[in-house]
């Protein structure tokens, strides 16, 4: 189930086999206090390298569970997940190892509050032993400058706006040259104006690096605007309900938002999601982890 | 006081302190504080010294105590100018510092491990929780039997009291760290020791310092009790001894000195906390914790 | 018939679940190891002629257990319990009755706070026990002087907790109520008071611990032979004076138990009065 062709990569990165995720028949059962909760039910999904894959669905449907499984935060009950052909987790190994090839950007931001932005960004290469402190810091500062954050590199996350912090978090992820960037509703708590800046920033980053992106969101317009494919998940237990292909060329900009093509795609996605949202609402589900 | 926003840059440091002081003089707060303290002193004076109401007159009033305190040749033998005053202060302080330092050096690492490793906590927490409800003073006879001399049992008691508080608060501190930070560290390629140094320790610092503030208070509490029961030298002993020979003025002097010294040590711990957690102070806008 | 046996069933099931719980088993194991090491530490001298430092002088668990089975039969022992608990609860109650309103008043009215908080803060660093001699001078009876010091100990704690808790009540709740037409009194009774309850109970639990410390100290310092006396502190002290160290340990454990029971009682009352917190 591969997607249509992208625009050719802007860089000379070997984008062909880097960051392909294969999710096959994954099931996840949570067991809080003996109540078997089926979070994900036999879900299968193939994500191509350098693809921007957006996951949408009602709250609490289990989308984060998939992300957690890929990242190695939670185990899976059955099924298998591969990255570039190598098994991350599967029958004999329900919990994947965590690693810097699949870096996560968290919903409420997880920059270490006790480190400056530069130290945060430099953290990955240092602990992996890839660079010494001075070099890592230099690279961190240069990458932060590219993202427009040179002035605040030595400030603490608590001192900068949430938009800047989130951008810095993405830089912190990218400095490790990951195969996959996992984003768990990263812009959820932001106002629309900040969000649009974040989108532009992310698109710019993507165009430069062509990293595979696995992005969970509620915001359908965000999904269509950023993504190559939008996967609509059902309400719990999560299964793939519908896949919307976004065959719009890159680079994209905000003018896309008022185009006919865009509107049609949003409408198509909305219908699918709405059905599931109503079901979830009526079931009175509280959000899972 | 001269740059309140006119030059467009915020005052810092000492200027800021002056600015805040000046601003606060415009509110009723400082005057109320003076009034409150004044009212208390006045009532104290009237009841104990002026009107000599029963049973208040048995305890020396503020004027008597302060005159004695400041006199070069005190009636009862102790004042700011006598040597034994400082010896007693020093002995108590030294005991508290040793006890506090020992408790911190033992309690913080223990708390960190208890918070970090469920296995470790399972094995150590029950024993701790069984011993903790035993009031510190109940240990006095046992301490006297276990350790020889005067100093050691007293220091042991202060250490024990302090230790429980510190260990418990540290453990709670680690447990309070948002799971996201651990996950972020993991997906950036950290090994266990990196997580410990970069997440566990800084993340629990706020709780650790709250615990330390409580623990120094508790150390003083236990120290005074121990000194009163079985001491020689020290402020607690001074209170007891002067009571025994009816030197009530000296007794009140010792009580007030104890309060002052206790407050100073608390403030020092608080200041140390603010320095170590500068990221918090900056995030909260120069207000500190 | 049906209900009783059903309750037994769940009790049995719960007990089984507890025993198979790894955490529980590890806990039991660690306590057993602790007791064993203690026993060995004491017996070392007997068996090998070498005195283990510190621990070697502390009577072994087996000895303590024997002594306890003897002591439990003496009415004097239970009288000590009764006396101490009585003092603790009385002093504690008075501290709550005075402290909670005081704390709430300071939280709600900033002028009151501006005036009364500074002297409160100045007196607070003086440890309650430092007040014992002054208290003895001041109050006519020993019992009252102990009560006063006990009161002080719990008072500071409860006020600080109430103050913190009341001020932390989210202003949104207050605004929501006001927009529905609440009066000042309504606001206080229906929003601030319930919102402060958790802090009141935390303050109470901590204050309980301090109260025990103070009662103990007071009993040990002043109960050594004067008119009133008795209580568990006195029990420990007189055992020490009589050189019966194993009885001292019995006393220590008894107080620990008494303290634990008191704190649990507070926590239970808190749990019952705050149903909205139960889902956690």
Image (tube, helix red, strand yellow):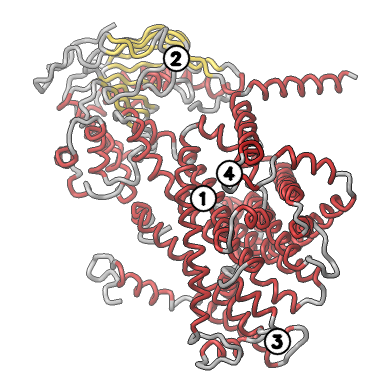
Asked if residue B177 can be seen in this view, the reply is yes
Q: CA distance from mark 4 to mark 2?
A: 53 Å
Of C40 and A163, nearer the camera is C40
The mark found on residue B166 in the picture is: 1
Label 2 crowd (10 A; few <14 / some 14-19 / many >=20): many
Circle 2 residue: A76
Is B189 on the left-hand or right-hand side of C75?
A: left
Q: Is residue B154 above or below residue B280?
A: below
Of B242 and C128, nearer the camera is B242
Q: Is residue B159 above or below residue B35?
A: above
Do the CB atoms of the residues marked 4 and 2 lie less than 8 Å apart? no
Circle 4 residue: C52
Residue B29: horizontal and vertical position, in percent?
50, 75
Q: CA distance from mark 1 to mark 2?
A: 39 Å
Task: Give the mark, 3 or 1, whose residue is nearer the N terminus.
Answer: 3
The mark found on residue A220 in the picture is: none
Choose mark 3 or mark 2, whichever is in front.
3
Q: CA distance from mark 3 to mark 2?
A: 75 Å
Residue at image location 39% in from the left, 9% down from the top: A90
Parent chain of label 3: B
User: Callout 1: helix, strand or loop?
Assistant: helix
Parent chain of label 4: C
Do the CB atoms of the residues marked 3 and 2 lie less than 8 Å apart? no
Circle 3 residue: B47
Q: CA distance from mark 3 to mark 4?
A: 57 Å
User: Callout 3: helix, strand or loop?
Assistant: helix
Residue at image location 53% in from the left, 35% down from the top: B121
Choose mark 1 or mark 4, whichever is in front.
4
């Amino acid at each position: 189930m591969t997607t249509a062709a992208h625009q050719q990569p802007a860089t000379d990165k070997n984008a062909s086999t880097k960051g392909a995720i294969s999710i096959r028949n994954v099931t996840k059962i949570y067991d809080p206090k003996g109540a078997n909760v089926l979070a994900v039910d036999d879900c299968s999904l193939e994500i191509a390298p350098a693809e921007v894959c957006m996951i949408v669905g009602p709250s609490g449907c289990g989308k984060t569970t998939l992300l957690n499984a890929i990242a190695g935060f939670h185990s899976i009950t059955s099924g298998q997940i591969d990255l570039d052909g190598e098994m991350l987790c599967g029958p004999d190994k329900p919990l994947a190892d965590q690693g810097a090839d699949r870096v996560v950007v968290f919903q409420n931001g997880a920059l270490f509050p006790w480190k400056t932005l530069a130290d945060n960004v430099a953290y990955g290469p240092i602990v992996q032993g890839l660079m010494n402190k001075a070099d890592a810091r230099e690279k961190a500062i240069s990458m932060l400058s590219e993202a427009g954050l040179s002035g605040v590199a030595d400030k603490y996350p608590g001192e900068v706006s949430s938009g800047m912090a989130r951008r810095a978090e993405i830089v912190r992820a990218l400095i490790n040259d990951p195969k996959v960037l996992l984003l768990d509703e990263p812009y959820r708590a932001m106002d629309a104006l900040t969000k649009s800046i974040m989108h532009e920033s992310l698109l710019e980053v993507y165009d430069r690096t062509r990293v595979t992106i696995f992005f969970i969101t509620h915001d359908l317009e965000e999904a269509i605007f950023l993504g190559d494919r939008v996967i609509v998940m059902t309400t719990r237990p999560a299964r793939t309900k519908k896949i919307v292909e976004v065959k719009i060329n890159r680079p994209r900009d905000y003018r896309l938002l008022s185009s006919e093509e865009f509107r049609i795609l949003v409408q198509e996605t909305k219908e699918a999601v709405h059905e599931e949202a109503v079901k979830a609402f009526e079931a009175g589900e509280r959000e899972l982890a | 006081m001269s740059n309140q926003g006119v030059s467009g840059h915020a005052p810092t440091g000492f200027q800021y302190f002056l600015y805040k002081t000046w601003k606060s003089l415009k509110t009723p707060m400082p005057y109320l504080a003076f009034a409150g303290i004044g009212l208390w002193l006045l009532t104290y004076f009237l009841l104990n010294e002026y009107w000599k109401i029963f049973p208040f007159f048995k305890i020396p009033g503020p004027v008597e105590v302060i005159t004695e305190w400041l006199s070069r040749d005190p009636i009862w033998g102790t004042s700011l100018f006598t040597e034994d005053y400082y010896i007693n202060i020093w002995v108590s302080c030294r005991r508290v510092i040793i006890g506090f330092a020992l408790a911190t050096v033992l309690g913080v690492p223990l708390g960190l491990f208890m918070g970090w490793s469920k296995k470790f906590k399972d094995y150590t927490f029950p024993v701790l929780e069984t011993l903790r409800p035993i009031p510190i003073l109940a240990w006095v006879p046992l301490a006297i039997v276990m350790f020889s001399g005067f100093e050691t049992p007293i220091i042991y008691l202060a250490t024990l009291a302090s230790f429980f508080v510190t260990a418990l608060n540290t453990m709670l501190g680690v447990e309070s760290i948002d799971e996201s930070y651990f996950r972020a560290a993991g997906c950036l390629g950290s090994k266990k020791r990196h997580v410990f140094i970069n997440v566990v320790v800084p993340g629990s610092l706020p709780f650790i310092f709250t615990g330390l503030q409580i623990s120094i208070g508790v150390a003083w509490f236990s120290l005074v009790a121990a000194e009163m029961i079985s001491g020689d030298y020290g402020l607690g002993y001074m209170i007891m001894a002067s009571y025994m020979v009816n030197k009530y003025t000296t007794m009140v002097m010792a009580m007030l000195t104890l309060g002052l010294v206790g407050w100073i040590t608390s403030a020092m711990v608080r200041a140390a906390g603010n320095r170590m957690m500068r990221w918090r102070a900056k995030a909260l806008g120069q207000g500190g914790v | 018939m049906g209900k009783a046996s059903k309750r037994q069933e769940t009790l049995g099931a719960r007990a089984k679940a507890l025993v198979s719980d790894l955490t529980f088993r590890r806990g039991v194991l660690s306590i057993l190891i602790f007791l064993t090491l203690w026993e060995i530490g004491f017996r070392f001298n007997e068996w090998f002629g070498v005195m283990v430092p510190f621990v070697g002088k502390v009577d072994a668990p087996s000895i303590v257990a024997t002594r306890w089975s003897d002591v439990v039969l003496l009415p004097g022992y239970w009288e000590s319990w009764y006396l101490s608990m009585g003092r603790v609860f009385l002093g504690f109650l008075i501290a709550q009755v005075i402290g909670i309103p005081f704390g709430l008043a300071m939280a709600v009215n900033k002028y009151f706070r501006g005036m009364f908080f500074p002297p409160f803060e100045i007196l607070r660093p003086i440890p309650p026990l430092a007040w014992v001699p002054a208290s003895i001078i001041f109050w006519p009876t020993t019992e009252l002087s102990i009560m006063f010091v006990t009161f002080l100990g719990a008072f500071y704690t409860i006020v600080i907790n109430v103050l913190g808790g009341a001020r932390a009540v989210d202003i949104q709740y207050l605004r929501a109520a006001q927009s529905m037409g609440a009066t000042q009194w309504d606001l206080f009774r229906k929003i601030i008071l319930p919102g402060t309850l958790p802090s009141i109970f935390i303050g109470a639990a901590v204050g309980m611990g301090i109260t025990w410390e103070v009662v103990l100290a007071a009993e040990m310092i002043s109960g050594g032979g004067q008119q009133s006396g008795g209580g568990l502190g006195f029990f420990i002290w007189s055992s020490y004076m009589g050189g019966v160290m194993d009885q001292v340990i019995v006393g220590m454990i008894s107080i620990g138990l008494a303290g634990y029971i008191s704190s649990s009682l507070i926590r239970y009352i808190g749990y019952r009065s705050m149903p909205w917190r139960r889902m956690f």
